[in-house]
C-alpha cells in the first residue's frame, strides 16, 4: 500500500514516467493505479484527443509502439492504456526496444494482470531504468483483515476485529469484492463510525451469529449447543455456507492450534506473530489448547482431511452437506 500511495503522490505532483508496467496476481491495485492515471493525468477536455484505451487481445506490440511514438494533439502528454495486456504475454519482450528510448510525451500504461515479467530478461531490466514496474502481490488470508483496517482508517472509519474477520471469511482474499462492500458501508454509515458485526449483518447480509468465525469460536470453546445451532443453520442454507469452505477454515484453525502446542514461547505477542493472527484472537487459541490436547488436535486434523475428501463428493455421494457437517461436529467435539 505504501508503494501505491507513493506512486499516486508522484502522479499528482506530475512526476510522471513514460511507461507504467502494472503487473501481478492481485488485480485490485493494477486497476486502481491505471484508473487514477486515466482520470487524472489529462484534463477532461483533452482526453478525447490525447487519451486512448486499447485491449491486449485486439492489438500487437507493434501497434502499441506505433501509437506510443505519436505526438499529443492538444495536451502536453498523450496517455495510452493497454488493458488486459497479459494477452500480449507471448510477445511482450518485443517492447524492450521501445522501453530503451520511450517517447517522453507519451504515458504508456500496461495492465498486465495475473502474470509477471521474467525479471531475468531485458524488458524488466530496461523498465526498471526508464519507467515504473509495479508488482501487485496477492495478500495471504491472514493479511486481509489488516488491509481492511488500513483502508478504512484512511477514510475516517474503524472496524472491530470480529467484523473484519467476518468479511474475510465471507469474501475471501478478493480485494475488489471487499472494497465494493466497504464502499456500500461508507455510503450508509457516517464518517467516524466503528463498523461492527451488526453493521455487516444489516447491510451486507452476513449473519453475525451463524458464520464460520462463530463456528470456529464455538468449537474452540467446546460449546456443543452453539456449534450445532450454527451447523444446522448451514445445513438449511448450503449455498451461502458451502461445506468445502467450512472444512477448510476449521482445518486451518486446528493446524494453527497444533503450531500453538509446539511453541516454547507462548507469550501473546509471539503467538500472534507465529500464527499470523490479530493479537485480539490469541485468547481463543489459549482456551482451545486447554480443550484440545496435542494428540486430540492431530486426530482432528486427520478427521478433517477425510471430511475434506467427502465434502467434494468422494465416497459420500448420498450424504447431504448438513449430515456431513453434523457428523464432523460429533467427531471433533466428542
Image (cartoon, rainbow, N blue to C red):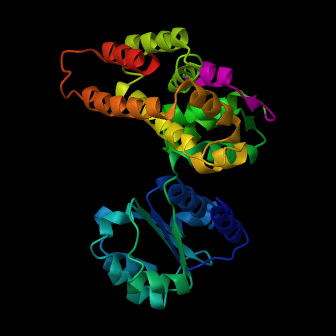
As for residue 203 lying within the magenta part, the answer is: yes
User: Quadrant location of the N terminus?
Assistant: bottom right
State the residue at coordinates (39%, 10%).
Answer: 236
Along the line of sight, the residue nearer the viewer: 204 or 248: 248
Q: Which residues are magenta?
A: 191-204
Along the line of sight, the residue nearer the viewer: 53 or 241: 241
Residue 196 visible in the picture: yes
Query: What is the quadrant of residue 145 in the picture?
Result: top right
State the residue at coordinates (67%, 49%).
Answer: 270
Residue 148 screen position, x and y as percent: 64, 43
State the residue at coordinates (51%, 86%).
Answer: 103
Residue 184 visible in the picture: no
- Whether 187 is drawn above or below 5: the answer is above
- Seen in the image, is 74 located left or right of residue 314? right
Residue 177 screen position, x and y as percent: 51, 40
Query: What is the quadrant of residue 305 in the picture?
Result: top left
User: Quadrant location of the C terminus?
Assistant: top left
- Whether 293 is drawn above or below 128: the answer is above
State the residue at coordinates (33%, 83%).
Answer: 94
As for residue 273 lying within the magenta part, the answer is: no
Residue 238 screen position, x and y as percent: 37, 18
- Seen in the image, is 119 located left or right of residue 92? right
Residue 224 screen position, x and y as percent: 51, 12
Amino acid at each position: 500500500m505504501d508503494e501505491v500511495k507513493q506512486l499516486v503522490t508522484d502522479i499528482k505532483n506530475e512526476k510522471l514516467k513514460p511507461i507504467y508496467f502494472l503487473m501481478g496476481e492481485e488485480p485490485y491495485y493494477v486497476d486502481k493505479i491505471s484508473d487514477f492515471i486515466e482520470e487524472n493525468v489529462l484534463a477532461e477536455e483533452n482526453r478525447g484527443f490525447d487519451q486512448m484505451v486499447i485491449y491486449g487481445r485486439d492489438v500487437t506490440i507493434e501497434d502499441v509502439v506505433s501509437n506510443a511514438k505519436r505526438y499529443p494533439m492538444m495536451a502536453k502528454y498523450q496517455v495510452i492504456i493497454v488493458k488486459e495486456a497479459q494477452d500480449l504475454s507471448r510477445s511482450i519482450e518485443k517492447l524492450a526496444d521501445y522501453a530503451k528510448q520511450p517517447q517522453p510525451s507519451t504515458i504508456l500504461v500496461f495492465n498486465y494482470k495475473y502474470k509477471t515479467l521474467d525479471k531475468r530478461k531485458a524488458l524488466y531490466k530496461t523498465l526498471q531504468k526508464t519507467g515504473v514496474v509495479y508488482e501487485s502481490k496477492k495478500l495471504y488470508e491472514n493479511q486481509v483483515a489488516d488491509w481492511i483496517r488500513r483502508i478504512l482508517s484512511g477514510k475516517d472509519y474503524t472496524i472491530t476485529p470480529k467484523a473484519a474477520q467476518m468479511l474475510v471469511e465471507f469474501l475471501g482474499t478478493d480485494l475488489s469484492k471487499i472494497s465494493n462492500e466497504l464502499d456500500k458501508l461508507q455510503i450508509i454509515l457516517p464518517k467516524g463510525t466503528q463498523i461492527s458485526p451488526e453493521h455487516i449483518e444489516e447491510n451486507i447480509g452476513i449473519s453475525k451469529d451463524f458464520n464460520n468465525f462463530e463456528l470456529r469460536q464455538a468449537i474452540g470453546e467446546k460449546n456443543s449447543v452453539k456449534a450445532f445451532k450454527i451447523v444446522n443453520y448451514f445445513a438449511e442454507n448450503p449455498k451461502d455456507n458451502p461445506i468445502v469452505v467450512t472444512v477448510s477454515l476449521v482445518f486451518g484453525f486446528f493446524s494453527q492450534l497444533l503450531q500453538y502446542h509446539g511453541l516454547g514461547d507462548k507469550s501473546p505477542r509471539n503467538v500472534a506473530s507465529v500464527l499470523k493472527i490479530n493479537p485480539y484472537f490469541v485468547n481463543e487459541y489459549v482456551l482451545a489448547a486447554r480443550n484440545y490436547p496435542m494428540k486430540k488436535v492431530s486426530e482432528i486434523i486427520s478427521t478433517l482431511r477425510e471430511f475434506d475428501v467427502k465434502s467434494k463428493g468422494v465416497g459420500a455421494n448420498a450424504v447431504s452437506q448438513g449430515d456431513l457437517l453434523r457428523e464432523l461436529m460429533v467427531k471433533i467435539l466428542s
